[in-house]
């Protein structure tokens, strides 16, 4: 189920964020945002690696979502690229985008010196979802990744979005 996948993502990614926050500093209220960001990052990783995982006889997509879109485990394991698989990936990508959006405000609750790094990691990693789309949802034969140029091209967007966060959250917010 997605609840099972959420727990997996929490354990492998959100915990890293929660531990990192202890080092970089954060304001009250940041924890739920960090958890969502970790889940978004790990879900992105799972979507990018569907084909690689299938070649190892692994499927991390929730069975309930496979059933919802009429995709069998055999189709995933055999790398069948179909309209149903595309619809499933679109659904999971939308879920990941929502988690990225819901977690964004939490970056403003981090120590100001760490906000840019976290925002950059989140934005660049989120870009992988766009590459899956640009690859026509072919997660079986094409690994979605961003070139250095594509990563650097996101910097103005990151800076613009961070300015809004920096205005909303002062240094005093994280010193509590």
Image (cartoon, rainbow, N blue to C red):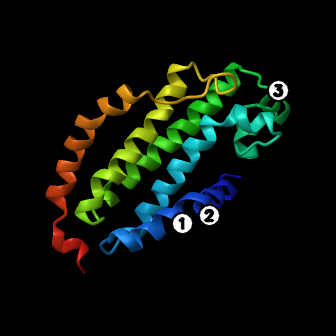
Q: Earlier in the sequence, mark 2 or mark 3?
A: 2
State if disc 3 and disc 1 touch (CB < 8 Å): no
In the shown orientation, is residue 23 left or right of residue 19?
left
In the shown orientation, is residue 1 left or right of residue 143?
right
State if disc 1 and disc 2 touch (CB < 8 Å): yes
Q: Residues within 10 Å of mark 3 (few under 14, many from 20)?
A: some
The x, y position of residue 37, in whole percent, is 46, 54
Q: Which residue is mark 3?
A: 78
Residue drawn at x 58%, y 43% is 45
Q: Which residue is mark 1?
A: 15
Q: Which residue is mark 2?
A: 11
Q: In this view of the protein, which residue sits in the foreground, 102 or 17?
A: 17
Q: Residues within 10 Å of mark 1 (few under 14, many from 20)?
A: some
Q: Residues within 10 Å of mark 2 (few under 14, many from 20)?
A: some
Give the SS element for disc 2: helix
Residue drawn at x 70%, y 43% is 61
The x, y position of residue 123, in whole percent, is 38, 42
How far apart in space, not on screen, are marks 2 and 3 (Cα)?
Answer: 28 Å
Residue drawn at x 81%, y 32% is 77
The x, y position of residue 130, in whole percent, is 47, 29
Against 63, residue 75 (above or below) is above
Question: Quarter-wise, where is residue 74 in the image?
Answer: top right
The x, y position of residue 26, in whole percent, is 32, 71
Question: Quarter-wise, where is residue 106 in the image?
Answer: bottom left
Q: In this view of the protein, which residue sits in the foreground, 63 or 166?
A: 166
């Amino acid at each position: 189920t997605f609840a099972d996948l959420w727990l997996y993502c929490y354990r492998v990614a959100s915990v890293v964020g929660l531990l990192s926050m202890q080092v970089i500093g954060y304001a009250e209220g940041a924890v739920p945002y960090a958890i969502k960001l970790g889940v978004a990052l790990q879900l992105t990783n799972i979507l990018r690696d569907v084909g690689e995982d299938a070649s190892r006889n692994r499927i991390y997509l929730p069975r309930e979502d496979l059933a919802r879109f009429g995709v069998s485990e055999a189709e995933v394991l055999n790398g069948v690229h179909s309209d149903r698989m595309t619809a499933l990936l679109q659904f999971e990508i939308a879920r990941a985008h929502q988690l990225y959006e819901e977690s964004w405000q939490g970056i403003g609750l981090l120590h100001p010196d760490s906000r840019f790094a976290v925002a950059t990691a989140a934005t660049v990693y989120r870009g992988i979802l766009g590459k899956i789309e640009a690859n026509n949802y072919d997660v079986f034969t094409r690994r979605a990744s961003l070139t250095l140029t594509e990563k650097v091209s996101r910097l103005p967007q990151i800076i613009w979005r961070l300015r809004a966060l920096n205005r909303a959250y002062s240094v005093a917010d994280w010193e509590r």
